[in-house]
Amino acid sequence: MRVLTTLCLALLASHSLATSFNVEVEVPRLRVAEYHAPYVAFWVENPDRSTIVPLGLWYDDQEKWLKDIRQWWRRTGRGQSKPYDGLTGATRPPGSHSVDFGELDALKALPAGDYELVVEAAREVGGREVLRLPFSWPADQAQNQTVNGSNELGRVTLTITP
Amino acid sequence: MRSLIKHLGLATLLATAMPAQAHKLWLLPSHTAVSEPQWITVDASISNEIFGFERAYPVDGVEVTGPDGKPAAVDHVTQMHTRSVFDVELEQEGSYRIAVAKPGYFLMYEVDGERKRGRGNDVDKMLAELPKNASNVKLMEVHNRLETFVTLGAPNKTALEPTGKGLELEMLTHPNDLYAGETTRWRLLVDGKPAPELKVELVPGGTRYRDSQEDWSVTSDKKGLVEITWPSAGRYFLEIGTSDDKATHKKAEQRRLQYLGTFEVLPM
């Protein structure tokens, strides 16, 4: 019994230390007269949204447009102020971008359960798109999910590596 | 630059569009078709969202032409924080053209290798206030014509006559006779002459409530003609832009022309 407990603790410890939560986001190249790179927000929610964990935000210091990331704004953004929770940074140009949220304490502390990673993009004088990628936590084994956006987001891949 | 901004006033600076500017300039009438004499009200703003107020567009140069071709009464011309507003009296039966088309200027120059720019309406003052050591001075004339139309009773076309100056629309289809699913024919004119190969961009109102702009464009043919089929009822923002070297001010090398119209389409 003691051995089992120790083993469990060891497993938990390894989760909290080393799990990689990598999100690869393709920002599509759009042929429009006036192009601004999209604001993109990342968060995790459970099915009844009793748990909302903000993971990150790409924006260009213009808080004026944050409300246009509408679901993020509703679920978490409007309750925050600068600096915004998670890994924040400037908007990304068209192309593929990778970000690993595995080191975030909020993610390490996430209770066991089924969740969705939500990725939302909103572009000035453009459109908006929300993609959802399901996952289970903690990750006992590798998980991989891919969703293809249809306008403001390209291919988005979540790779969880315990 | 700082003194230039102070002298010209922020509103004037914001008023004059520069090329590839990020915001849309528009007028928004409270009504476009009414059946008894009354006052209507018009908002003027600069924004990304169609039609959400963001910054006031100055309307001190508003011109309202009545059904007889003469100026109609305007009242309560007011510039507020996020919009300007004015009232228009519809007294005579027929159509009214509401236009804001004051020319502005855009100035680019360098001081000690640093690029500067200024915007305003009073070009002589702008040039007079240039720093003595300004180099590479470039002046651009900017003509933004904001228009919308309103009709009391049956429409007529007297007020719709193009002025023959700058970028305009010749309204072959009356702008207050637009219905969902129907096709409108207009001719683009530059200084009264047909303007071929120009792109007309359209955005339906209500962008706040959807996830895409739903904008589309049509291009004028060899005769300057465009055909626009309205997908549904509502208010539409229309934008056309071009530039040429026909500036009237002798120091301006280039003339930037924009036509910015608001049109209401009714359900069939």
Image (cartoon, rainbow, N blue to C red):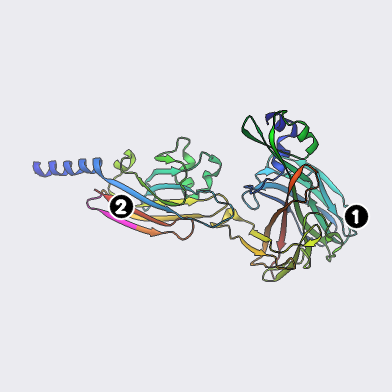
Residue ID for mark 1 = B70
- Quadrant housing residue B171: bottom right
- Viewer-side residue, A18 vs B252: B252
**Magenta-highlighted residues:** A139-145
- Quarter of the picture containing the N terminus of chain B is top right
Q: A35 left or right of B99?
A: left
Q: B36 left or right of A132?
A: right
Chain under disc 1: B
Residue type at mark 1 is: Lys
Helix, strand or loop at disc 2? strand
State the residue at coordinates (84%, 48%): B74
Residue ID for mark 2 = A159
Q: Position of residue A13 (x, y in %)?
A: 20, 40
Decide: is B70 above or below B229. above
Residue type at mark 2 is: Thr
Decide: is B13 above or below B266. above
Spatial separation of the CA atoms under disc 1 and disc 2: 69 Å
- Viewer-side residue, A79 vs B237: B237
State the residue at coordinates (31%, 54%): A135
